[in-house]
């Protein structure tokens, strides 16, 4: 694919059934302007049973995007800050304490961030990138907003050094109560460090 972008195409939904228009394996994503909280609206379809599961999980979606499946041993979210009158500033993309993303992935994301800036975007962007087995970088999801892992990436270097951790992970959890109740439950652990 040209310029590090995966081919994508709309995948129609008729009467609640996904109309498959490409060979297996492929990736299905819900087309939405909303953040999807760590990929909950993304499904890899390797065979017909996966497609049936995707139909159940993605029920109600009006539009789905299908992308080629890419066997990728590396997955990064690479961050830039975009400010008026400045070139996009690389903020990091740490998953492992001893290495960051490949330079080719950073430059691909820099070009995407620059395009966003040219269109008037200002703020943080986290661009999801896959690195295939040959080392080629593919941008799969440009998030022109703070992404779910923004905080971890910004603090990972310091925390990994202080605590001796070699890698980091973002975990998601839900809380059915109020924000005040959630914070009250967290305060003891926060005070302990």
Image: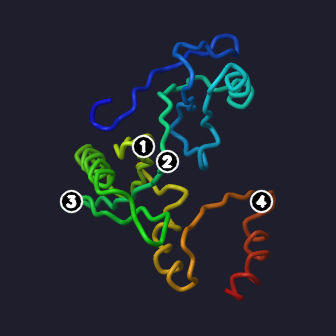
User: Circle 4 sits on which residue?
Assistant: 175
User: Circle 2 sits on which residue?
Assistant: 73
Choose the circle earlier in sequence order: 4 or 2: 2
Q: Nearer the viewer, mark 4 or mark 2?
A: 2
Q: Which percent across, then down, holds residue 124?
A: 39, 58
Distance Cα–Cα, label 4 vs label 2: 33 Å
User: Circle 3 sits on which residue?
Assistant: 87
Q: Specify few, some or many for label 3: CA neighbours under 10 Å numbering under 14, 14-19, or 20 or more.
A: some
Choose the circle earlier in sequence order: 3 or 1: 3
Vertical relation: 50 (above or below) 161: above
Q: Quadrant of residue 8?
A: top left
Closer to the camera in the image, 81 or 162: 162
Instruction: State the residue at coordinates (38%, 65%).
Output: 92
Contact flag, marks 2 and 1 (Cβ < 8 Å): yes
Instruction: State the residue at coordinates (40%, 56%).
Output: 78
Q: Specify few, some or many for label 4: CA neighbours under 10 Å numbering under 14, 14-19, or 20 or more.
A: few
Choose the circle earlier in sequence order: 3 or 4: 3
Q: Which percent across, then down, holds residue 24?
A: 57, 21
Q: Nearer the viewer, mark 3 or mark 2?
A: 2
């Amino acid at each position: 694919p040209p310029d590090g972008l995966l081919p994508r195409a709309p995948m129609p939904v008729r009467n609640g059934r996904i109309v498959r228009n490409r060979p297996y394996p492929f990736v299905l994503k819900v087309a939405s302007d909303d953040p999807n909280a760590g990929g909950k609206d993304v499904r890899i379809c390797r065979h017909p049973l996966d497609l049936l599961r995707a139909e159940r999980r993605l029920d109600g979606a009006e539009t789905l995007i299908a992308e080629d499946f890419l066997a990728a041993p590396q997955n990064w979210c690479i961050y830039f800050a975009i400010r008026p009158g400045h070139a996009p500033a690389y903020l990091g993309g740490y998953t492992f304490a001893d290495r960051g993303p490949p330079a080719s992935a950073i430059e691909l994301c820099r070009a995407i961030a620059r395009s966003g800036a040219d269109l008037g975007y200002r703020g943080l962007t986290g661009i999801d990138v896959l690195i295939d087995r040959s080392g080629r970088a593919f941008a799969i999801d440009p998030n022109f907003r703070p992404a779910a892992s923004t905080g971890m990436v910004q603090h990972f270097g310091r925390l990994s050094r202080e605590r001796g951790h070699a890698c980091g992970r973002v975990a998601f959890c839900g809380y059915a109560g109020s924000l005040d109740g959630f914070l009250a439950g967290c305060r003891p652990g926060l005070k302990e460090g």
